[in-house]
Image (tube, rainbow, N blue to C red):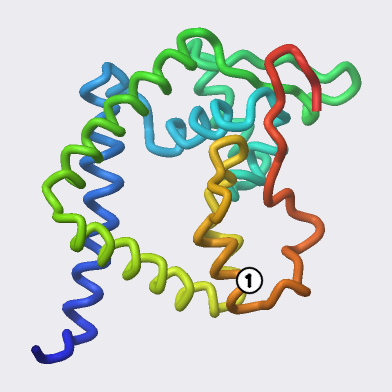
Amino acid sequence: MAEPTLAYLQILADLFSETVVKTMTLRLLEETGAHDLTHSQYQALRYLHTHGRCTIGHIAEGLMVSPPASTKLVNRLVEKDLVRRTEGAADRRHAEVDLTPQGRDLIVRVRKTRDTRFATVMNRLSPAEKQALVTGLERFLIAAVKDEGVGFDICLRCGDDRLEECPVNTAQLEVLGPSLAPRPEVHWDLEPVESGQSR
């Protein structure tokens, strides 16, 4: 079999990305009654569901957006009664944000539906095809993080949901070696905060 061309590989990568974002995220938002929620708003809700109550600054850092953009995002979610914000006593920039019951319920519904959709797709693959997919994606990640900063850019900030052997962390170790830690000013693994507690 001839080696695939670069153009074909790029098309496959684009199609894979579009499939995950559009059919397994954006379409699910519509199907679960969250049709007016943008992708960035969904990401903010997912971040809060994973990490628990946190500051607007942590949300900005976790989603890699500016603090003003994070504030605007939170304001929209407050208007939709999906998050609640508790202002800092001395500084509004230190306001803490948490999911409302409606926001938590929405994320749980979307994640359950997404899990079902993903399982349906994966069950159409043979065990050998699943293993080939895993191997291919892991090797792709390792190749990608050889470019400086990519590991930080693609990190999902999984928090409590993180895998013991995260492929991004594994790739970072393979490329950089265990002696090189992530940038110290960045919270790569922000510990989740239980509802009612402060950071």
Report which quarter residue 15 is drawn in. bottom left
- The percent coordinates of residue 25 (x first, y second) are 30, 37
Q: Nearer the viewer, residue 42 or 163?
A: 163
Identify the image quadrant of residue 74: top right
Describe the element under mark 1 as helix, strand or loop: helix
Residue 75 in the image: x percent, y percent?
Answer: 57, 23
Mark 1, Cα crowd under 10 Å, few <14 / some 14-19 / many 20+, is some
The number of discs equals 1
Q: Amino acid at mark 1?
A: Leu
Q: Is residue 19 above or below residue 176?
A: above
Residue nearest the observer in this picture, 183 or 35: 183
* Quarter of the figure that contains the C terminus: top right
Q: Quadrant of the N terminus?
A: bottom left
- Residue 150: where, in percent of width, then height? 55, 68
* Coordinates of residue 35 in the picture (x, y in percent): 28, 23
The residue where tag 1 is placed is: 173
Q: Say whether residue 131 is left or right of residue 179.
A: left
Residue drawn at 34 percent across, 19 percent down: 109
Up the image or down, 179 lies above or below 116; here it is: below
Residue most extreme to the front: 127
Up the image or down, 101 lies above or below 63; here it is: above
Work out whether residue 71 or residue 39 is closer to the camera in this orientation and state it: 39
Determine whether, in the image, residue 91 is placed left or right of residue 120. Answer: right
Taking 1 as reference, is 42 left or right? right
User: At x 55% / y 55%, what residue is drawn?
Assistant: 165
